Image: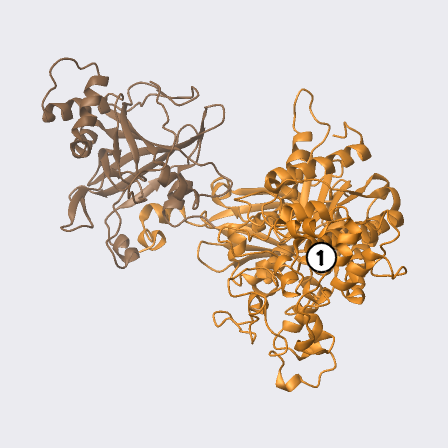
Amino acid sequence: MTIGVIVPSSHPGCYKTNFYLPIIAAAPPGDAETWYAGLPVTIAAAPETAPDGLRITATYPSNMPVIQMAGDPPAAVPFSTVFAMTGGFVSFYSDSTPFTLPGGQVLPASSSSGDLGAIVLTIWGADFGQLNKGLAPELGRPVAILYRGLDKNAVSKALEGEVGKMPKRALVQSWKDGGGQGTEPDQATLKQLHLARILAGSGSVFVNGGTPLGEAVTALSGSDTNAEFVLHSYEVDAAGNAVFVPPSSLIVAVGGGHV
Amino acid sequence: MSDGERWKGHPLQTLLNAPRNVQFNVGFRVYQTSYPSAPLYDSVKNIGVGVTAYLQNPGEARVLAFTAVTDQNGKLPVTTVSIAPASAVIFVCHVKDKTLANIAFEEDIDTDAASMLEAASSGTFNRSYELRSRIYPKYADFFRFLQIYDKESILGNSSIGIAAYVTDDNTLVKTLSEFELSYRDANFNVMFEGDSWFHYPPNDKIDQDLYASLKAKLQETFKPGDSTPKRRCQSVAFQHFGDTSDQMFSLDPGPGGDADEHTQFHYTKRCLNSYQFELIVLSSGGNDIGEPGISAHKKKDDDVATYRKYIVPDPAVAQDHYYDFRYFDPYEAVKESSSTATDRAERLQGNAGYWLKRSFPILLKNHLWSLYLDGKEKSDQQTQVDLEPELTTLLGLSPTDYNDLGKSLAKAADKALAFPDPATDPSVDFPNMALTNSLANQVLDKIFVKERFKERFDDIRANMVRFLDHVAQTQDTTKLLVLCHTYCYAIFTDGPTDYFKQRGPWFHNRLRQARIAHPLAQSVAIKYLIDYFRWNVLEDLKNTYGPWFDYYDARQLNRKSGDWMDEIHLTTTGFERVASGLMQTIKTKFGADFQ
């Protein structure tokens, strides 16, 4: 399967950037360091290399599976929830088949069993410009972030709400793009059809940074649960080829930036 | 909450930012423009050079990582340090006051910050740095100094550098940085040493200047076309916004400055010392007459009879704001405490005397400022400087013709072209006045103060000589052309310029203040200034410096009012015409295919 890249552009209106880390919700206002230290979760990350990406594992007690997200009222989400690091359009692709990046580079199919897939987040133009300021100067400027190893059902559930925010005219257009003819379906059906297109990799929906995108696949390990996914980010060179950018550069940039 | 605070302690951040051992394999070489780079090592004293490595985290102060000394190959001993991946490393090479590889370093040199992200992942940081002694950082500091303190340039007048934002001045400063980074001996290297009224854009959003026009033509010449140019054209522009030749080529920093590095010429000389040029476009002299700043800014109440009584400092800025010095009455502006000063200009409030002595009005015999300087009374000012008898006879005009010319600035400017040129007519030799009975001399003697007229042009020539002598000392003149230009005979319009119609005219008001009201007399005065500059300065310099100095005579160009944006500045079309003439001179020197 091949994915395209949307060239970043400026966003109309009053869009506000919100950079987010890909797992574990942000601390509520106050002493963030103490709040994070109190979480019953540990994080491990395998060395990042192209094309394997950065493998991130969150381990937490199976009997304490949720984290309270800051908000009013605070919402509980599973520790395995992954978040949009920036704003942008997202699509979903199955991990059961090899994944082709712009320029032809192929990421092998996932060896995990189950209904897994990948979210591709094309970084929104305004975020791209802002993010550049915090990225390590000598590394690339990613245009897209790839989350591999996500549970398809959880992604569907997470994106359903985002699709629900789409205007009807966009849903109608998606229905037509998908070959729809004749009498227009009702709005609920249009939403389901568009969500199906997203999950099939032929449609997309815009999300803001920090939006839950689904959950990493989990596995039991004694009394703990391991949630694991793989993060990629890449830029596109002048020849149109994807060039791997270490996701840790992105994570550092989101967390305060480089000098 | 900032991003740094929001995510501080986040398990993923903490994990990825955990310090890791990094082995540093770092070397340094000194970049030389003419030779291969050399190791950072003092081969004369046979000792290494000290280097300090600092770690920098966002929003935090630098912390020392390690110090070391280079070996004969310019390399530091391999050193391992525990580093947070989010940090960056900066090396400070302690080369201040050292001469290494024939380059004298005035400052220590900092490398750019290098991210530790990949090094922390791989465990090694391998880097070879090349050091350059660059003029730009200090020059940028100087430029900021000008923006704050230099009252004589319009840039300084803006007090907070507003002018720099609405013009391309800041861009011009950066040309030095770009030039230094891309410099190669083999390039066609150009210095634009330009600060005359032809050579800065009053507002580049409206019209470009000679610099922009000529630079574009040079770039076009070196642009890859059917055949690839043999080399690149790189240029550096030393210009501000209305500098005089004194500001360009004097080592006197003037008010506010206290050292060489507060003068433009200090940096010009350093540039000449460090780099070889094939073309230097030298545009100078105009602002020594056109007094940038002092006379600019036309207001309705600034007229012949309405000199301001006092010099009024602008309360919004700390220093005197010399725009307010435009039309002051010097007789009213004398400081009580300085009334005994022998130099009458020194008796004036603030820096008014400094500007007055550099002004155009003190060249005009019947201007109030001249009368003041000469110790005369205000009542000594003539109500009208009548040049009709001399001009009608000299130019063969009837009284009717003369009256008609009084109604049209453009027609008067055309007629003034018949006034004798000192280069070709020996009957006009003002201010020397060997032939005191010539009509042309009599006209000029009624308009100008001959001693100050001569002194002003002598100063311009001396300043340009100071520059050219340094060029001769530092450049290979067998490969060089220093190219100047004359000014165009103005189509004498009295309109102000820029977005807000707040600047100019520069001459018209002053001549009217000196009671020289007839457009023909005004045009004759301006024509003679332009002719005299060409004859007494440019031609004289050409005779002195020979084949590597030349000038383009643009006096007769741009004879339509549409070629002029205001009294002294051309439109883009007008500047293009002058630039084409300069390009012809360049091609004559270097050959048509000089790329």
Pick the front one: B377 or B283: B377
Give the residue displayed 74% in from the left and 62% down from the top: B447
Is residue B550 in view? Answer: yes
Residue on which disc 1 sits: B248
Chain painted orange: B
Chain that bears disc 1: B
Is residue B132 in view? Answer: no
Give the residue displayed 78% in from the left and 57% down from the top: B390
Q: Position of residue B518 (x, y in %)?
A: 66, 57
Three-letter residue code for mark 1: Met
Q: Quadrant of the C terminus of chain B?
A: top right
Q: Residues within 10 Å of mark 1 (few under 14, many from 20)?
A: many
Image height of B442 relative to B401, above or below: below
Q: Position of residue B383 (x, y in %)?
A: 66, 69
Say which colour chain A has. Answer: brown
Q: Quadrant of the N terminus of chain B?
A: bottom left
Give the quarter of the image for residue B345.
Answer: bottom right
Give the quarter of the image for residue B575.
Answer: top right
Pick the front one: A169 or A92: A169
Q: Residue furthest right?
A: B434
Image height of A226 relative to B463, above or below: above
Q: Position of residue A239 (x, y in %)?
A: 49, 23
The secondary element bearing badge 1 is classed as: helix
